[in-house]
Amino acid sequence: MSALKTRLQSIGAGMAVITAALGVAAIVLIVSASRAADADIQQGDAGALPVRVLTVSYQDDAAINEAYPGLITARRESDLGFQSGGRIAEIAVDVGDRVEEGDTLARLDTSTLAAQIAAADAQTNEAQAQVEIAGATEQRQRTLLERGHISQQRLDEVATNTTAAEARRAAAAAQANALRAQLVLSRITAPFSGVVTARMADEGAIAAPGASVLRLVEDAALEIRIGLPAAAAATLVEGEAYTFETGAGPIAAEFRTATGVVDVRTRTVTAIFDIEGGLARAGEVARLQLETGIAESGFWVPTSALTEGRRGLWSVQTLVRRDSGEWALEPRIVETLRVEVDRAFVRGAVDDGEMIVASGLQRVTPGQSVIPVEDAD
């Protein structure tokens, strides 16, 4: 009886040990499962990378400001010279001098010409005296004809001499006038008010006929000549003022006209603007600020959102939801319609309202889990 009791006590102690062991094993399994779950959660959080995104918004009436460079020039610019050659006696102006219309700028040595004019005047006076003598002779011959002392033929001969003398006087006077015209042409006068920008000769030099001596620029009337695409030139309104950017700041210029002919080399149409005021100077570059519409429907993206693919194609990384509710990246091909320095106008397989990655594309790959962060820009 005591042996049976002892055996039963041994069996009870063994069952207690087994129960304790099972409890410890259960605790170990629960802790391991909890740690595995925590590891899975931590691993999932580490894989979902925060990315800056923007929401796609399609536009049908988008427009951009484009700058077209042009050159500020004087409306009139002339290289001035003498019509006839000779020795330069005086140049009255220098580079930078402002002159008024009609001012004498330079003159030739006219001493020889003055002597020729004096000789021509003397010949004219001599011819005039011969005309007077011939006229008096003709008058006396007419009186004799009336009295019957000479024949009609004699009177006709005397009248012819008078006509010839008058012709010689007219020729001498014309020669004197031609020399006086050369005297006028021996001076360079300003054809318009402006500034002397170049001086190509000095006193004492022998000027060839037509050779440039001075360059005169009309600084009071400036214009801008600019090459524009035919479509852009067609939008300009005659008489309307447009804004140009220069090194000294913005200026206003009024559109005057366009050539209407497309240059075969530049494929542009020349447009001409009259400058109304400002600090413009001839020779400066002025850029026309012109708003140009985009005829296609699309949306703006920063250039940092574009990835260049094969064969010149571009793509954006679009955020799509998985069945688990997480966001993942999916590349979509887009077409660039207009490209600026920091942004592009595109269209493609992206719906209005979808989100795309705005920047940091070097940190992500297609299919990666991400957390969207709205881009304030």
Image: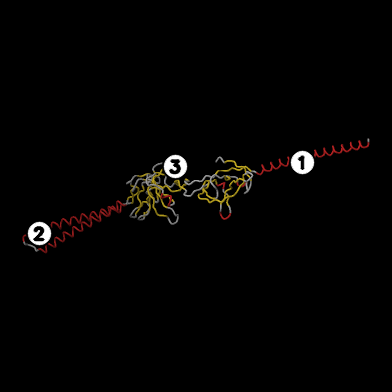
What residue appears at the point 17 percent right and 57 percent down from the top-left corner? 131
User: In the rendering, which numbered label is found on residue 250?
Assistant: 3
* Residue assigned mark 2: 142
State the SS at label 3.
strand
**What is the number of the mark on residue 203?**
none
Q: Amino acid at mark 3?
A: Pro
What residue do we see at 71% from left, 41% from top?
37
Task: Write down the residue under mark 1.
Answer: 29
Instruction: State the separation of the CA atoms marked 3 and 1.
Output: 78 Å
| Mark whose residue sits in front, 1 or 2 | 1
Q: Nearer the viewer, residue 255 or 212?
A: 255
Marks 3, 1: nearer the viewer:
1
Judge depth for marks 3 and 2 and give the one in front. 3
Q: Is residue 352 left or right of residue 212?
A: right
Q: Secondary structure at mark 2?
A: helix
State which tag comes first along the sequence, 3 or 2: 2
Q: Position of residue 117 (x, y in %)?
A: 26, 53
- Depth check: give the residue in front, 45 or 343: 45
